[in-house]
Amino acid sequence: MKPLLIFDFDGTLANTLEAGVDAFNEIAPANGLKTISLSELRELRKLHTRALLDHLGISRLQAVKLGAQIRKQIHGRMDKVDMIEGAREMIEELHAAGFRMAILSSNSADNVRTFMERFGLLKCFEFIEAGVSLFGKAHRIKSALKAQGVDSGDAIYVGDETRDMEAARKADVCGVAVCWGANDHEAMMSEGPDYCIETPADLIVCAEKFLGNPNIS
């Protein structure tokens, strides 16, 4: 049986980074926070999630509240958000090859489903776990695997943040770090992922390697 690939959503499949920054900047003043310029993102992408929160002066409790506000702001912009370049083709190819897929995200179920329906990809995913707390992904990964009857050794978690790779490690699943989202290559590698990829097409190679395909170099 092919492994179950569980995807993060924001920054991994959906190019929500700029929309997220815009949403943050709209609510930042009312929450006593400084806004973020797009030019700052290059440096901020080097920071681990906790270091980023410290840098912005955001507590964990405040991060949860801000996350809910940002999701509401992004909801009205989802029709303008595009997929990460190459992600659609990657999903279609993995689906055609028989790989099982799911999404586990801090974003809302409505946002994820609406987005995937727009691109005709919702049918490719067996389930969607949404509304996951900022640092609660490991627990939700374990719960999802138990509910699906999938062993941790037969699962891969794909994400664009250091906390995604931390969650994969804690859930004892294979972690694939993508380097086109919230965190850059250097930051992602510091979490010791099983694979670190630069393009969506690279994930197809990783999935085949995970299966032990001798024809994949």
Image (cartoon, helix red, strand yellow):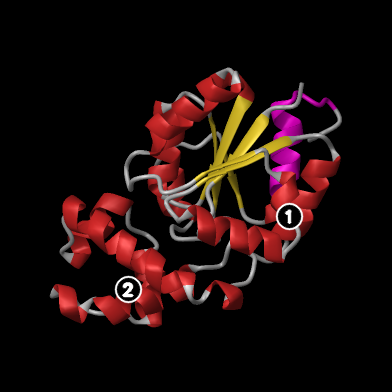
Q: Which residue does the image show at 60% across and 56% down from the upper left?
A: 113
User: Residue 184 in the image: x percent, y percent?
Assistant: 46, 58
Residue 62 in sight in this render: yes
Residue at position x 66%, y 58% in the image: 116
Q: Please give the residue where the numbered disc 2 appears in the rendered image.
A: 24
* Label 1 vs label 2, nearer the camera: 1
Residue 36 pos. (x, y %): 30, 78
Can you say whether 174 is above or below 16 in the image? above
Between residues 91 and 205, which one lies in front from this camera angle? 91
> Is 106 situated left or right of 199 in this image?
left
Secondary structure at badge 1 equals loop
Where, quadrant-wise, is the C terminus in this rendering? top right
Please state if 25 lies on the left or on the right of 8 as rendered: left
Q: Which residues are magenta?
A: 202-214
Asked where in the image residue 195 lies, by quadrant, the reply is top right
- The residue nearer to you, when weighing 212 against 137, is 137
At label 1, which amino acid type do we have? Leu
- To which residue does mark 1 refer? 121
Instruction: Check the image and name the residue furthest to the left.
Output: 32
Tell me the residue at 78%/57% (across/down).
89
Is 129 situated left or right of 200 in this image?
left
Q: Is residue 209 magenta?
A: yes
Quadrant in the picture for residue 107: bottom left
Residue 88, placed above or below residue 208: below
Q: Main secondary structure of the magenta part?
A: helix
Locate the N terminus by quadrant.
top right
**How many C-alpha atoms fall within 10 Å of the one at disc 1: few (<14), some, or many (≥20)?**
some
